[in-house]
Amino acid sequence: MAKFDETPIIKDPAVKGELRPPKIREHASAEVKCHPSKPKDTAAINLPSELVPDWQERAIARFGELLDKNQALRVYMDACVRCGACTDKCQFFLGTGDPQNFPVARAELMRKVYRRYFTPAGLVPGLGDAADFDEEMLQKWYTYFYQCSECRRCSVFCPYGIDTAEITAAAREIMASIGISTKYVTEVVAKVYETGNNLGIPPLAWIDNSEFLAEDMEEITGLPIQFPVDEEGADILLIPPSADNFANTDTMIGYGKLFHFLGVSWTTSTYCNEAGNFGLFLNFENLQKVNQRMLEAGRQLGAKTIIWGECGHAWRAGILTPTLSGSMDDFDPPYPYHISQYIVDMFRKGAFEGHIDKSANDEFLVTYHDPCNSARAGNLLDEPREIIRNTCNRFVEMPRNTIRENTFCCGAGGGLLTDELMPIRMAGGKPRAEAVKYTQANYLATVCAICKAQLPELMKYWEVPVQVGGVIDLLANSLKLK
C-alpha cells in the first residue's frame, strides 16, 4: 500500500481525458465565480433583487449589527495573528495553490473592512492594514467567500480557536442584505418555500415516487414495504434530503426496510420533505425559517418523533432547532434525533438480534467519509461507524488525520455544489480522493446527500474506483426482513 501524503499541495489538478472538468491554472481560482441570483428567487426569500444604490452604507451598517449581536465574530476579527497554522489544512488551498484561497487570507478580506470602519486604524489613512469596502473588495468577497465550504477544518487547527465558518457566514449575510448572492443557494431556498424541498419536487411527484418505490419493493421482496406520505398520527416523521426519493433511492429504500422491519408507523410530509437547509449558507432569517418548517410539519401530522435523514448540513442546522425554532418538548425525544442515532439505539436494544447477515456486504471493503457538517459541526462521529461494524465484515478507516474531527470536506459543501464551481470542487476534493484511494476500499459510505452528489464525480475525476452510498444502504443489504 502506498504511503499516504498528509500534506498534498496540488498546483495543477488537471487529469487527462476529454470529459474531465476544465483544469484550473495555478492561483487562478479568482477567475471562477458563482452565477448571480435571479430576481424571482431573491424576491421570494425577502432579499434585494439587485445591488442596492446605497450598498456601501447598508453593508457597513449590517456589519455593525452583526458585530453587536455576535461577540464571537468581533473576537475573530481581533484575535488572528496571521500565524498561518490553518493554511495547509484547507482543502481549497491544497487543491488550487491560490495564496488568496485559504482561511487567513480569505478572512483578511473582511478584517481589512473591519479595521477601516470599526477600529482606530480606519481614522488615519495608512495606519494599520485597513481597506475601504469598495467595488473591488466586494468582488473579492463574492469570489472567495463562495469558495469556502464552511467546513471548519481550519478551526480545529487554529491555536486561537477562530471559527472561519462564522466569518464566511457573516460575509454572506452582509452581501445578501445589499443584493449580492448566488443563484444556486437562493434558488434552492426559494424552492423550499414553493414546493417543500430543495429540488423543487411538487407534492404529487413526491407521492407518485413513494408509491412507485413501494410497488418496486413488493415486486422484489414480496413484502408490503410502504413509503407513506402525509399520514396523520404516525409514530415517526422522517425528514430526509429530497434527493433520497429521486437520486439516492437505495437510501430511501433503506428507510422503508428499516421501519417495515421494526413495525413502526412512519411518514414523510409534502409540506416539508427536505431536511437540507440552505439558509445556513445565506443568512440567518432564511436559516431560521427553513428550520421552522420541520417542527411545523411534525405538529401538522401529529407525529410523536421527528427523525432527520442522511444529510450533513441538515443535521448541522437541525441541532440548532431548539435555539432557532423553539421547544421540542411535544416530541419524543424532545431534541433533534438523527437516523443514525435511531438505528444505533435499536441495535443496543437488541431489535436486530438474529436478523443481520453481515456476509451480504462481503463484496465491499467499506470506508467511511465523515461529512464536515455532521462530524465537526454535529458530533455525529461514532454512530455511523457502529452501524457499519454491525452490518459489514470488512471496514477500514482512512488515515487518522483525515477522519472524524479532522475530516476533509468533500469539496462541495457550503453551497458550492454548482456546475460553475466544478474546477474548485474537483481541486478542493483532491485530499479526500487521495485518502479514499489509500484505503483501497470499493465502497465509500457517508451520511450526507451533498457528499453523495459530489463524491462520485470527484472519484471519477481522480480515478478512484469506488462506489458511493449511504450507511443505511448497508443496513438494508444485511437486514433479513420478516
Image: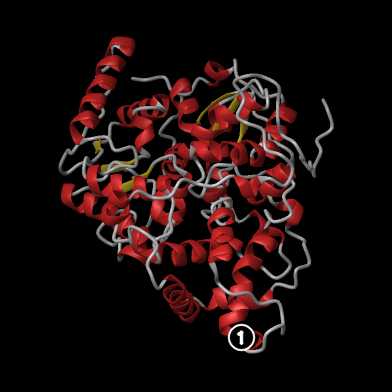
Q: Position of residue 61 (x, y in %)?
A: 44, 78
Q: Where is residue 333 in the image (x, y as percent from the top left)?
A: 34, 54
Q: Which residue is drawn at 51% across and 45% down?
A: 416
Q: Residue furthest right?
A: 3
Hey, which quadrant is residue 204 in on the image?
top left
In the drawing, does residue 406 fall left or right of residue 454? right
The type of colouring in the image is secondary structure
Q: Up-down: is 93 above or below 355?
A: below
Q: Which residue is drawn at 39% across and 50% down?
A: 37
Q: Is residue 255 visible?
A: no
Q: Position of residue 69 (x, y in %)?
A: 45, 78
Instruction: Give the class, few, some or many, for how many residues have Cα within 10 Å of label 1's Cα (few <14, many ≥20).
Output: few
Q: Can residue 338 be seen in this view?
A: yes
In the drawing, does residue 24 fall left or right of residue 269? right
Quadrant into which the C terminus falls: top left
Q: Where is residue 457 in the image (x, y as percent from the top left)?
A: 56, 28
Q: Up-down: is 215 above or below 398?
A: above
Q: Which residue is drawn at 60% across and 31% down?
A: 458
What amino acid type should be assigned to the residue bearing mark 1? Answer: Thr
In the drawing, does residue 34 fall left or right of residue 228? right
